[in-house]
Image (cartoon, rainbow, N blue to C red):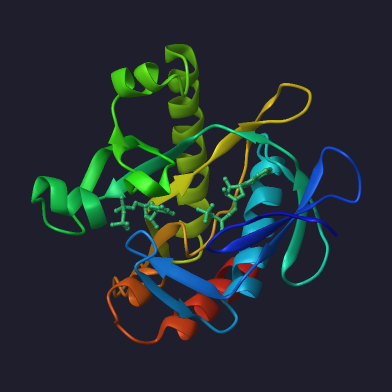
Amino acid sequence: MKLVYEGKAKRVYEGPEPGRVRMEFKDSATAFNGQKRAEIAGKGVVNAAVSARLFQWLGDQGVETHYLATVDDRQLDVEQLTMIGLEVVVRNRVAGSLHQRTGLAEGTPIAIPVVEFYYKNDALGDPLLNDDHIRLLGLASPDLVARLKQEALRINQLLSAFFQDRQLILVDFKLEFGWNPNGELKLGDEISPDTCRLWDEATHERLDKDRFRRDMGGVEDAYQEIYRRVMA
Ligand code: ADP
Ligand code: UDP
């Protein structure tokens, strides 16, 4: 199949039919805008399975996603989307860049979830944007920004409950949206331990990519633990 894009974590192939693409999940991991790189054994398999499970489950709850079918243990077929050039981040607890920007202690619960938009632009290091910046760049209209925020908050409610049932705290996560060939807004990309912070409810042990970002060890085991709990 024709490779149309190779990113840091996935390869995207032209689909078996027009309007479809095949996403292949790699074991490669990057952090800090690509400055840190490694292979995490089995990560691609975990991220493909977890993403498929979450897209299917969100679909059952009425969320429009790009997911179509699982091809094998690393490949999913999805609707081809024209991606909106924004990363939508939702936060239920302080961590990562919010901790760095505000000085609030990591783990501080956030009563009303915080939604942030980042510019998908590797050359600029994916900077944080406000509504006016998004308008200035022509990335989305104010109406679309409001819609993306509402949709991200609904997905947050659903996913938080899904993970809570599995003794996991959904600390924060990143979503990407796009338009399918029929002009419908769909949730795209992936939902995985690469794109979510997930803490064990009892111990607050980090079971996500932070183990890699911070050289905490036990990276492979953390991904396998998420696989076990999500697929159970
Ligand atoms: P990056 O581009 O950040 O290195 P990846 O390695 O995950 O990230 O590459 C996957 C690329 O595919 C991303 O640019 C993402 O926006 C894009 N993408 C995700 N879902 C779809 C889709 N359904 N159709 C087309 N492109 C998609
Ligand atoms: N995130 C992501 N891709 C990015 C940046 C962030 O999936 O390019 C996710 C990250 O895993 C976390 C959330 O978005 O769950 C918030 O990340 P943060 O802004 O704290 O950035 P970080 O310091 O982790 O890069």
The quadrant of the image that shows the C terminus is: bottom right
The quadrant of the image that shows the N terminus is: bottom right
State which quadrant residue 201 falls in. Answer: bottom left
Q: Residue at x 78, y 23 (%)?
A: 182
Say whether residue 168 is visible.
yes
Residue 132 in the image, given as x and y percentages of width and height: 30, 18
Residue 33 in the image, given as x and y percentages of width and height: 36, 59
Q: Residue at x 49, y 44 (%)?
A: 175
The residue sitting at the left extreme is 103
Residue 71 in the image, given as x and y percentages of width and height: 83, 63
Is 94 in front, or is 159? 94
On screen, residue 141 versus residue 60, left or right, reads left
On screen, residue 55 versus residue 157, left or right, reads right
Say whether residue 232 is visible.
no
Is 203 in front, or is 141? 141
Placement of 46 over or under 116, stated as above or below: below
